[in-house]
Image: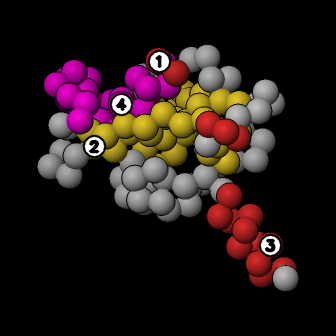
Amino acid sequence: MLKRRVREEKDEMARCPFCRALLNVPEDIRTASGDFLGGRCECGAVYVCDPTGHNVGQGYLDALAYACGDDWDKLNSLNSGRDYSEAVLNYDVRTHRLLEIEDIRRNFLGKMIFIRLARNE
């Protein structure tokens, strides 16, 4: 019974939308362009957490800059769908879960912005 409960809790934890790997809780990341909450998946995708869900544009820019290693020339030359894939998902900061639309609650709903550069990048 305990094994099943632990497994169910792990299944509910946030997973990468590209490879389905479990994600670490977002942590403070400092780059040349600023600080944000985020991380990196084992598949190479980066993610940025917008805990309020009201600053997705800045989170998107932070994710692109982080994925490009703060190389703004590279960032400005990228095209969505060709040079990188993206996903913006609902995120519950208290439980570290990515939420489906029917799971949305009024409590602590944020966004998680994912960027994965194309393999040829």
Q: Horizontally, is 5 left or right of 37 in the view?
A: right
| Magenta span of residues | 58-81
Q: Nearer the viewer, mark 3 or mark 2?
A: 3
Q: Is residue 78 magenta?
A: yes
Q: Which residue is the extreme one toward the right? A: 1
Q: Residue at x 80, y 30 (%)?
A: 107
Secondary structure beneath dot 3 equals helix
User: Against 52, is 13 above or below?
Assistant: below
Residue 29: image x %, image y %? 54, 37
Mark 1 or mark 4: which comes first in sequence?
1
Q: Which residue is mark 4?
A: 64
Q: Based on the displayed image, in which of its 4 quarters is residue 10 positioned? A: bottom right
Q: Based on the displayed image, in which of its 4 quarters is residue 41 positioned? A: bottom left
Amino acid type, residue under disc 2 in the picture: Leu
Q: Which residue is mark 2?
A: 117
Determine the main secondary structure of the stretch shown in magenta.
helix
> Viewer-proximal residue, 112 or 61?
112
Secondary structure beneath dot 4 equals helix
> Viewer-proximal residue, 27 or 8?
8
Q: Which residue is mark 1?
A: 57
CB atoms at circles 3 and 2 under 8 Å apart?
no
Mark 3 or mark 2: which comes first in sequence?
3
Mark 2 or mark 4: which comes first in sequence?
4
Mark 4: few/some/many CA within 10 Å (<14, 14-19, 20+): many
